[in-house]
Image: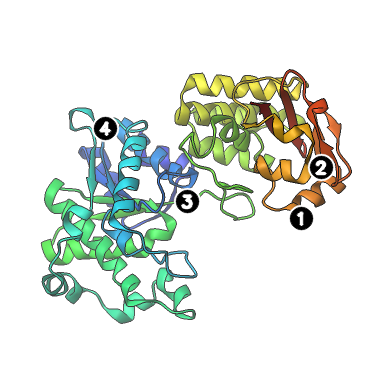
Amino acid sequence: MNVLDILMERGFIEQMTHEKEIRELLEKEKVTFYIGFDPTADSLHVGHFVTVMAMSHMQKAGHRPIALFGGGTAMVGDPTGKTDMRKMMTTEIIDHNVACFKKQMSRFISFENDEAIMVDNGDWLRNLNYIDFLREVGVHFSVNRMLTAECFKQRLEKGLSFLEFNYMLMQSYDFLELYRRFNCKLQLGGNDQWSNILGGVELVRRLHGDQSFGMTFSLLTNSEGKKMGKTEKGAVWLDPEKTSPYEFYQYWRNVADTDVKRCLSLLTFIPMDEINSLTAVEGSAINKAKERLAFEVTKIVHGEEEALKADTAAKALFLGGAHGGSIPTTEINTADFETGMDILSLLQETKLVPSRSEGRRLVTQNGIKLDGVAITDPNSLITLDYFKDNELMIQKGKKVFHKVILK
């Protein structure tokens, strides 16, 4: 089966520049393709993970991925999907983030024996001569046409800086550079990158008279069209220090029933026949598919051992147990409870709520339990009497658990 059919069957593909030609290219040769990742944080998140999975499918089919990290483009910032200009980062922060991305990416893609390539566009963008760049690249871009691009249109009302206006040219230049260095013929990316990808395809054609191609993937959204991968604490990260394997597992275990099939298709390697069987059920039977989703995604990202630990901890809590080493844990000094810590401070200390007002709302609505017992008074003092064997399990709502250990 052509890898294009695999990607289409699993729901990855949103748009393509030339479907017939891309299909023929993928059938007749080992294609070098690239996906770009701007290092705006020190970890990839689940939004990136869709493109990483697509990259993995392509590699398994015999094609060669280039993971391009934006050590250069991150110094400008992609205006796509942003209502305001991104915060400017120092080169030191960007370089640190690139190093983190490289380490994470090597867990999902094999870079041995030239099976894949990692590059940093800072290697060519940071030292560009601006006048030379304008003469070689800028001359091929129509401002009128650029202003019709979705990534710019939504920013024009609030104000688009000239700094960001250069982003499309820089990303297009990346494609040109990778074409020249590695004979890269195909750029993949999230659907929000369509305008930028078209710019690169056109630039290669104008400067080399050669055909190159672009393909975009669905963004990770739920059945209502809202982006997935956000919690009360913020993004769901692939770094276990930022989102623990247990929290990561729980995120996928708790997705809406209507999103399970889509997530299984995009974020796991389970065959589609099996996914169809898992999700062709009604009512509570869908929970089996959710458990499978949570386990498989956690196994890919954090390894089978962590996935098993998270699965065991989740089931122990469901059965009423208060154990499981993967549950998020906070250590607090014993002295803090000798005279009592108020419940709202405890919720903030464990980062279960962003504010005291949110904690008060949860408590008054019976949304907080300590070792299975509801706390209904927001003025409650939590003392050492609440602890068993120096441990206390806090439950927020039905699905969020957090353990407090005395030190």
| Horizontal and vertical percent position of residue 16 | 36, 55
Label whose residue precedes the other's in the sequence (1 or 3): 3
For marks 2 and 3, the one nearer the N-term is: 3
Res. 194 in view: yes
| Residue drawn 49% across the image and 33% down it | 240
Q: Is residue 85 above or below residue 266?
A: below
Kindly indicate the quadrant of the structure image that contains residue 74.
Answer: bottom left
The foreground one among 206 and 346 is 346
State the residue position of label 3.
218
Residue occupied by mark 1: 357
- Indicate left or right for 383 with 115 as reference: right
Looking at the rendered structure, the number of numbered marks drawn on it comes to 4
Callout 3: SS:
loop
Residue 367 is labelled as 2
Residue 298, image x, y percentages: 52, 29
- What whole-number distance in Å separates the C-alpha atoms at marks 1 and 4? 54 Å
Question: Which label number is shown at residue 62?
Answer: 4
Sequence-wise, the earlier of marks 4 and 3 is 4
Q: Nearer the viewer, mark 2 or mark 1?
A: 1
Q: Amino acid at mark 2?
A: Gly
Disc 3 residue type (three-letter): Ser
Q: CA distance from mark 2 to mark 1?
A: 13 Å
Between residue 26 and residue 50, name the one nearer to us.
50
Q: Distance from label 4 to label 3 (Cα)?
A: 23 Å
Q: Residue at x 49, y 26 (%)?
A: 299
